[in-house]
Image (cartoon, helix red, strand yellow):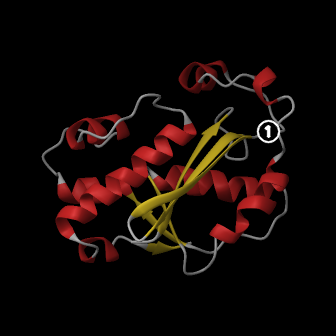
């Protein structure tokens, strides 16, 4: 299985307020590379977001703005590339919000949500939060709400699910963006 697991953290409720991003690259069902960056959003930080992820305005003072980050990562977001996220609707909306805010071309890629895969596989669970699924699958998640830790966890969730079911059950859950 080949895919990129993605996770954003945001400064506030605005979808263009990305303050960190991580990508975990998977080739032939093996993690082969990782990318992490802080991002300097052009908006204020909301205290609750800071409380969740711990990223403060001073942490991103010298970080690149999203257009610089996009120049590095856009090759991963191509029409036939699979991008995976836990609660993909959120991460995809942050990506779209940043691209729109900076008047960049929309990304076209395939998307798969590990919340949806886990709901399909584990319907008996009371919730399908990242930490719940990681606990069940015994996947380490030492720093929840750190974009890189969350991306690694997401990648490992899909890889564990693939071990038991192959890829066929997930094909119906893939959407084009």
Question: In the current view of this chain or complex, which residue is farthest to the left?
Answer: 124
User: In screen coordinates, is 58 left or right of 55?
Assistant: right
Question: In the current view of this chain or complex, which residue is farthest to the bottom?
Answer: 80
Residue 162 falls in image quadrant:
bottom left
| Residue 115 makes an appearance in the image | no
- Where 54 falls versus 26 (above or below)? above
Tell me the quadrant of the picture where the N terminus can be found: bottom left
User: In screen coordinates, is 83 left or right of 137?
Assistant: right
> How many discs mark residues in the rendered view?
1
Residue drawn at (41%, 62%) of the image: 30
Residue drawn at (63%, 76%) of the image: 78
- Where 153 falls versus 177 (above or below)? above
| Residue 56 makes an appearance in the image | yes
- Residue ID for mark 1: 41
Residue 8 falls in image quadrant:
top right
Residue drawn at (60%, 47%) of the image: 22
- Where 167 falls versus 54 (above or below)? below
Question: How far across and down, in percent of the image, does residue 59 sit?
Answer: 76, 25
User: In screen coordinates, is 150 left or right of 97?
Assistant: left
User: In screen coordinates, is 139 left or right of 13?
Assistant: left
Give the secondary structure at mark 1.
Answer: loop
Pointer 1: residues within 10 angstroms few (<14), some, or many (20+)? many
Residue placed most toward the observer, 174 or 59: 59
Question: How far across and down, in percent of the image, does residue 24 sit?
Answer: 53, 54
Question: How far across and down, in percent of the image, does residue 171 sit?
Answer: 33, 76
Tell me the quadrant of the picture where the C terminus can be found: bottom right
Question: How far across and down, in percent of the image, does residue 45 sit?
Answer: 73, 26
Residue drawn at (19%, 68%) of the image: 165
């Amino acid at each position: 299985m080949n895919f990129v697991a993605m996770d954003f953290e945001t400064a506030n409720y605005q979808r263009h307020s990305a303050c960190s991003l991580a990508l975990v690259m998977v080739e032939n069902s093996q993690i082969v590379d990782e990318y992490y960056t802080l991002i300097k959003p052009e908006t204020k930080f909301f205290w609750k977001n800071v409380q969740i992820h711990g990223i403060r305005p001073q942490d991103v003072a010298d970080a690149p703005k999203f257009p610089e980050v996009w120049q590095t990562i856009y090759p991963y977001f191509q029409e036939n590339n699979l991008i995976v996220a836990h609660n993909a609707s959120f991460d995809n909306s942050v990506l779209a919000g940043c691209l729109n805010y900076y008047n960049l071309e929309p990304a076209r890629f395939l998307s798969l949500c590990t919340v949806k895969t886990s709901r399909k596989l584990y319907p008996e669970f009371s919730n399908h939060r990242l930490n719940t699924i990681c606990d069940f699958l015994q996947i380490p998640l030492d720093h929840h709400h750190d974009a890189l830790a969350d991306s690694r966890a997401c990648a490992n969730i899909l890889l564990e699910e693939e071990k038991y079911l192959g890829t066929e059950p997930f094909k119906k859950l893939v959407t084009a963006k």
